[in-house]
Image: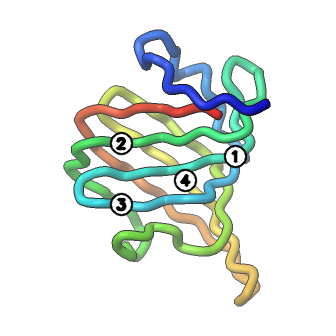
Amino acid sequence: MNHTYTPRINMLDTSKFDFHESTIVEFQKHSNTIKMVFEQVSYDNHPLERVTLILNNVSSVDTDAKKNQPDLMAAEDGEILFLDLEEHTCEFVIEWNDFLHKLRFHHKYIINFSNFSIVIK
């Protein structure tokens, strides 16, 4: 049985999340909010099926990628190589896989925001 809940972020230690090699399945910007959905994340060495990270009041998105608004997915599949989540900044590198064109490429992102929430399923 699946349960979805929004934990109080002050109860979670964000340093215990491990996004390395997780798959990003959604990466969209709406107004000043960015939503990212990941599969195969772990928290304190416990596997999580799906994690949604919502960055609110985004003030900047710095990237070497071409920005496609509002869908920031650069290809149909992406794997997180590195993700560092701080109080007002999220920095990460994604290895994108474009299966149609048989391409693999990397993009780095630095996103600044005022607050965030995490939903775990």
C-alpha gap between disc 2 and disc 1: 17 Å
Q: Is residue 55 left or right of residue 106?
A: left
Name the amino acid, label 2: Leu
Which residue is label 4 attached to? 93
Going from N to C along the chain, the mark reached first, 1 or 3, is 3
> With respect to residue 10, does 101 lie above or below?
below
Going from N to C along the chain, the mark reached first, 1 or 4, is 1
Going from N to C along the chain, the mark reached first, 2 or 1, is 1
Name the amino acid, label 1: Glu
Res 48 label = none
Name the amino acid, label 4: Val
Which residue is label 2 attached to? 55
Which is more foreground, mark 1 or mark 4?
Answer: 1
Q: Badge 4, how many Cα within 10 Å: few under 14, some, many 20+?
A: some
> Is 3 or 55 nearer to us in this picture?
3
Q: Badge 2, how many Cα within 10 Å: few under 14, some, many 20+?
A: many
Going from N to C along the chain, the mark reached first, 3 or 2, is 3
C-alpha gap between disc 4 and disc 3: 17 Å
Which residue is label 3 attached to? 29
**SS class, disc 4:** strand
Q: Badge 1, how many Cα within 10 Å: few under 14, some, many 20+?
A: many
**SS class, disc 2:** strand
Which residue is label 1 attached to? 39
Q: Residue 90, position in %: x, y?
A: 41, 41
Q: Is residue 63 left or right of residue 40?
A: left
> With respect to residue 78, does 93 lie above or below?
above
Rendered residue at 61%/20% (across/down): 16
Rendered residue at 49%/26% (across/down): 6
Q: Residue furthest bottom?
A: 101
Total numbered labels placed on residues in the image: 4
